[in-house]
Image: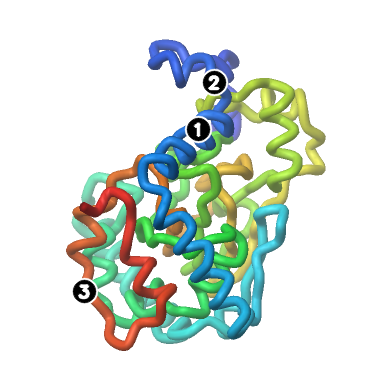
Amino acid sequence: MMKNRYELINEEALYAKNQNILKRYIPLDTRLALIKLHFIIKDPKPFFIRKLANIKSLRLQRPKQSISENGVSELCGKNLPHFEKIFSYWLEKSSELINNKKLNNTRYSKTLLNANEILMHKPTLKFAFSHELLSIIGEYLGSAPSFHEVGLWWGKAGESSAGSPFFHLDSLDSSCIRLYVYLSDVNEGDGPFCVIPKNESLRFIRKTGYLGNSLSDKTVFKYLPLSSLRKLTGNAGSVFAIDASRSLHYGSRCLEGDRVALIFSYSSYHNDENTASFLECLPRLNNLTTLQEMAYDHISIK
């Protein structure tokens, strides 16, 4: 049964064999912090400029919503700019794309469209770069965020390769925010995003020296109580913000129904992900605030 398949992952997943020295011996959170420090030392000016810009923005107007210090929050989509437009558009568009794939018997792929295709829809671009959303994320990160990517993900019922079905932390940055917009009703059997909040996840890292691999449920709950797990079920239109670099998580264990979600990602300016080619090709919006201008920028852009 598929349910058991998620328990069969290698129990030595704490140990990163066949990796470089950094990845084999230095815990993930320490490694990401060292990478960030390296880039800040290499190019310190933007670090302070972005910190100051974030503080000034929050002094002028604090966002109406916030992300919990524990790295997991549900946001009210209706209070985010352009949300109604993007939700209605992608609800219809994702259904059309999935139906076409099923009719044509196309090989399953978890991504329905790439980021550039998604952001050709101008309200989606406006949503991703809206000052209100960037302010919410900047308040949590403590700095003006950089936009990283967006994906339209389809978790197909009965498909074990859907999404990321094993516990893990993302290695994008020492903290990064993933914003999940559900485009389908998601109950327990439909592959909800499941997360262990930051404090409990950091406790796991301290106990195990977690290096960044995928983990079985058995390994995680050997060190943490089962009650630490939050299953983010919700109706279509639900919005969740997650610190995916500090909160152990998995998704798309779609045992009964499909799960469709639009996922936006944000990081700090200083990390080793090369997003220059992506950000430089994005259409530029007009009359941008400082936070919006900075969301287009990243250390990989020369």
16 w.r.t. 173: above or below? above
For the residue marked with disc 3, what is the amino acid?
Answer: Pro
| Label 1 close to label 2 by CB (< 8 Å) | yes
Q: Quick one: label 1, few (<14), some, or many (20+) residues within 10 Å?
A: some
Q: Quick one: label 2, few (<14), some, or many (20+) residues within 10 Å?
A: some
Q: Which residue is mark 3?
A: 283
For the residue marked with disc 1, what is the amino acid?
Answer: Leu
Rendered image: mark on residue 222: none
The answer to which of marks 1 and 2 sits earlier in the sequence is 2
What residue is rendered at 55% in x and 76% in y?
56
Tag 1, which secondary structure?
helix
What colouring style does the render use? rainbow
Question: Distance of mark 3 from mark 2, alpha carbons?
Answer: 39 Å
Q: Quick one: label 3, few (<14), some, or many (20+) residues within 10 Å?
A: few
The answer to which of marks 3 and 2 sits earlier in the sequence is 2
Q: Which residue is mark 2?
A: 26
Q: Depth check: give the residue in front, 148 or 222.
A: 148
Q: Quadrant of the N terminus?
A: top right
| Label 3 close to label 2 by CB (< 8 Å) | no
- Image coordinates of residue 146 in percent, x first then y, are 40, 60
Tag 3, which secondary structure?
loop
The answer to which of marks 1 and 3 sits earlier in the sequence is 1
226 w.r.t. 81: above or below? above
Question: Distance of mark 1 from mark 2, alpha carbons?
Answer: 10 Å
For the residue marked with disc 2, what is the amino acid?
Answer: Ile
Q: Which residue is mark 1?
A: 34
